[in-house]
Amino acid sequence: MSAPFRPKYDPSDVPTPTSRPLNPSATTVRRAKTLTRPERSVAPVPLITPHAAPLPGKPQAPESEDIPLDAWRIFSRVVSFWAPDFLLESLGGLKDKQKRQAWREKIALCFIIIILCGIIGFLTVGFQKVLCPDTTVKLVSRFSSKGTVQGVLGVQGWQMNITKYPDLPGRNFVDLLKDPGQDITTLFQRDNSLYPACNGLSFRAATEAPCANATSCPLPTLNAATMQSLGFINTTLIVGYDWDQVAALQNYFVLDGAVLNLNSYMSLHPNAIPSDTVDAAIRTILQTMPGDSGRDGTRLFFYRSDLRQAVPCLVQRYYAGNIDKVTPGCVISQLVLYAGLIVVMSLVLVRFFMACIFNWFMSSRLAGPPDKHTLNRSAISPAVMPEGANISIDNLHGTAPWAGPGGSKKLAKGGKGGRSLASSNSTLVNADSNGVAPVVSLAQIGAELFAICLVTCYSEGEESLRTTLDSISTTSYKDSRKLLFIVADGMITGAGEKRSTPDICVSLLEADPRFGNPVPMSYGAVGSGAKAENRAMVYAGHYTVAGRRTPTVIIVKCGTEHEAATEKKPGNRGKRDSQLILMNFFSRVTYNDRMTPLDFDLFRKIHILMGVTPDFFEVCLMVDADTKVFPDSLRYLVNCMHHDQMIMGCCGETRIANKRQSWVTAIQVFEYFISHHNAKAFESVFGGVSCLPGCFSMFRLKARKQSGDDWVPLIIKPEIVKEYSQCVVTTLHEKNLLLLGEDRFLTTILLRTFPNRKMMFLPQAKCRTVVPDTFQVLLSQRRRWINSTIHNLMELVLVRNLCGTFCFSMQFVVFMDLIGTVVLPIAISLTYMLIIGMALSPPHNFEEAIPLILLVAVLGLPAVLILITTRKVVYIFWMLIYLAALPIWNLVLPVYAFWHFDDFSWGETRKVEGEAKGEAHGDGPAALGANNVPMRRWEDWERSRLRKIRREERRRRDFERTHGAYIGSNGELTTTRSEVYSQYDGSDTISVASSDDDHWGEQIGGYNENSTQYPPPPIGLNAQALESAETVAASDLEAMLDAGFDDRPTHGRVQLSDGPKYTPLSRATGGRGTALSPTTPMGPETGAVSSAVADEWKTHAKKRSGGRSGKHEYGPLGPLDPGSRF
């Protein structure tokens, strides 16, 4: 081929054909649908602008106090122009610039709320008054259409009932009554004194006498006596004309709705009157203007000032009735009224019926146990890290380093289906040569997922803590599948308590002696300046009650040494920091990211307590320390997670434990009920519950993709953890998001990040909590809740990918909730105005009764919902108490909250000994301090741990040569024989450049969880896969003991070879050849795990596996040989 025709590309760029078949379970990509999968959606812009982290070795420059001006700040300054800075400093005491700006933003928000309340009030009351005034309404109601009533005639516009027939020459009243309602005013004698509005006017229609002679006016003078003598009875109704009738009558026209009869004037002046503008206008209307649809002279007469002056006189002299058609304003008003009735009633009824449907049908299905088909399928193993995790080059299958190289079992080569599982009973199955990720049979995990129960404590007493822990421990969920994760937020002593909260927590724990006394471990906390670093101690053991023994870890935040010596509340960083300890830990475990010393300490202790590594945990139950969980609630919530992998969070029903303690608790009973069974049940139909309460909610740590071949981290997604952990916030909006309502903000960022996933409410899962019993505490709590709700809804309303479309979307529901929250004060005011108005003036027609119908529907349907969902009539009594307290809920609390938009403290909700008022977590210097917390990968921490053990072993040998055996740091008699290998088989624990220098000894902990005097940890997974496992016969065991055991071979250095993997330059082939499961708590490298020594791990593993004798080696999860099958 000649040079000009050579292809201008590298042949290696051409895709290599593959025979790998398509995965039939995977969804195909359609046009315009490439980004609709929730795990592939574009990450939204963070709500809180993250601040740049300081560079290593360089101190962070202090942040400038000058806040850049934007449209919102300019608007806040314009609205609060009447309060200059010097007045706020001198009179208001706002010395800080950010506090003054927060106050101005509060004024701006209150101004907007007042405007919205005014708009709602105008649309409710003023809109109808403007378009259809009361005078018009009353006037229309007084009309009687011409020709509809027999035996009546019109006199000066009034409808007269004719009881007698006067005998008039040339006038037959019988003939007149054939056209009922016609005007006979021109038959009466009249003079100018009857028309005072015409005084001072010079035109002929105002100055001349109405009756030229007696012949033209045969009836007596027009007055009340004449009417009575003639037998004319006034019906007090005005004769009403329509436009067609005006067009059909001669010399009739309309001025501003009034029908004028100009027959008498035209008979007196058949010809035009020179220089009389009024006469010219009258003749223009009657003779020139087409009268097919009536003649309206309003525009002509009101256009000129001289003609406008004549209008009252003309109406008074020639008035014959009025146009009885409803005015356009009244028509529009009625349309708006009916449209509002339809929209509001539709929303109320749809909300009611959807809540009923969810309670009747959907919730029971979600709470039911998973079916066998779900449990028998195979999916990605928990030991496999998600896409984007830190994975070594030679790790083809993405397994965690503590799980060994590639896991423990090999996937048998597939047949026609492309992917073939070795066995439905296998726990971990590795990939074949094509590199398919390891999969796990969900039957081994079972219906009960590994759940971590987070309990955050601050100032609660022993009784409250014990009640919460007892309720979780005694749930129907197995102890082997739940872990109590208790976080004590600082060295705090609650008001009225004799012991601190950490002392109370630790006293409730049955500590595991293998961990010894914990030492403070450092971690990065939520705080600014010096508080960006914190320390915590991890107590591990079991919580025992009523025969239950639940694995428990207690994290006590104790603060730095300087903080412990100077601060009143050392270690206290807030509830959000307590949640982030858990979220950061599992995020780093999931992605194999750099860990803090606290994270590594937690990893070791959780693994020993549970028998599985922390990456096996999939769900997290968050409970407050004053909440009592019902026995089956945890199981119901986990079942809900089983039924739909798209559910990322779920909450249960929170009931009140102290409902009869005071009037304050009594008014909250129905409010809690209706917020769950009406609001949250309705939102669950869309899968978009806007707030999962922090006192009782379950979040999914990570979810399997729909195809089952990878993990999607949810609450532990690094972007979410980073946004949730922001500590430097400047604007009022950011502070209301982060500092007042952690639970709602966490729900908000989850919905923003995963708009296509679901947040659910499950009424079958129940708990009881203690609510504020004094009005001052209730006021403080609702201030935080209302302000947090408003600011979070302001963010959620901007999320466009939520379920539904237009008015039938979750976005519209969020918008209505936002508007409904900010207009609560005007709503309750209008409600009481309506009630008082209806009591004083009952409605006479359907239109007047429409507001009353809406009120009855809004207040009455919840009573029906009570009978449907709970079937407890007593809740109607609580509803009546709630209705009596509506002014508090809708007026007092919102107005107080709005005016305290710039108050970011927790107030009176949680009091500690000697504290006047809860400070805001965001108080303090804004400058970022140097971060001295060491961050290292798990492999590095594990290396340091092994080196520390080797150093202690070397010192022990040196000491023993001189003094014999000695008592170790953990109190056990240390012998000359001890293995120093990692229990995590195949992990990267052999350093390329080994060093025995003790750099990290203090950050690892002075305990050995693998001490030989303690039993090995429990087996974490179900034993279904062990039915065919092998045991060691007595003869084999005897032969092994006679033969003895060789020392473990050492590993050689590892370098990158020419092949696709890392291979050892010199690695002994004897001893062992396979890796254990990540859940296996012992192995050939962990002689210190059990009483077995050297290669006795083989025998010990077989004993635990419960198998039979044979040539194959078996661990607790199956055969150790990757090529073997069950």
Image (cartoon, rainbow, N blue to C red):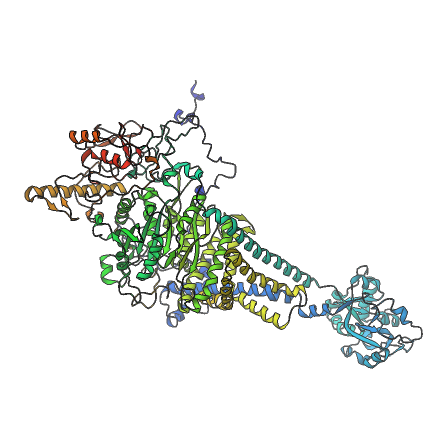
Q: Position of residue 777 (x, y in %)?
A: 39, 67
Front in this rendered view, residue 63 or 259:
259
Please give left or right for residue 253 compared with residue 434 in the image: right
- Tell me residue 1087's x, y (percent): 20, 38
Q: Residue furthest left?
A: 962
Asked if residue 727 can be seen in this view, the reply is no
In which image quadrant can residue 438 be found? top left
Q: Is residue 707 above or below residue 888?
A: above
Q: How many marks?
A: 0
The residue lying toward the viewer, choosing from 976 and 783, is: 976
Q: Is residue 717 above or below residue 657?
A: above
Q: Quadrant of residue 148?
A: bottom right
Q: Residue at position x 32%, y 28% from top? A: 1124
Q: For the point 40% across and 37% down, which residue is it?
A: 379
Residue 574 x %, y %: 33, 58
Tell me if 788 is positioned left or right of 287 in this view: left
Q: Taking 544 as reference, is 439 above or below it?
A: above
Classify residue 853 by image quadrant: bottom right
Residue that protrudes farthest toward the right in the picture = 169
- Residue 230 can be seen, yes or no: yes
Q: Is residue 27 above or below residue 716?
A: above
Q: Is residue 945 left or right of residue 363?
A: left
Q: Quadrant of the N terminus?
A: top left
Q: Quadrant of the C terminus?
A: top left
The x and y percentages for residue 356 are 53, 53
Front-most of 905 and 645? 645
Q: Residue furthest front?
A: 1034
Q: Judge by depth and name the residue closer to the eye, 521 or 860.
A: 860
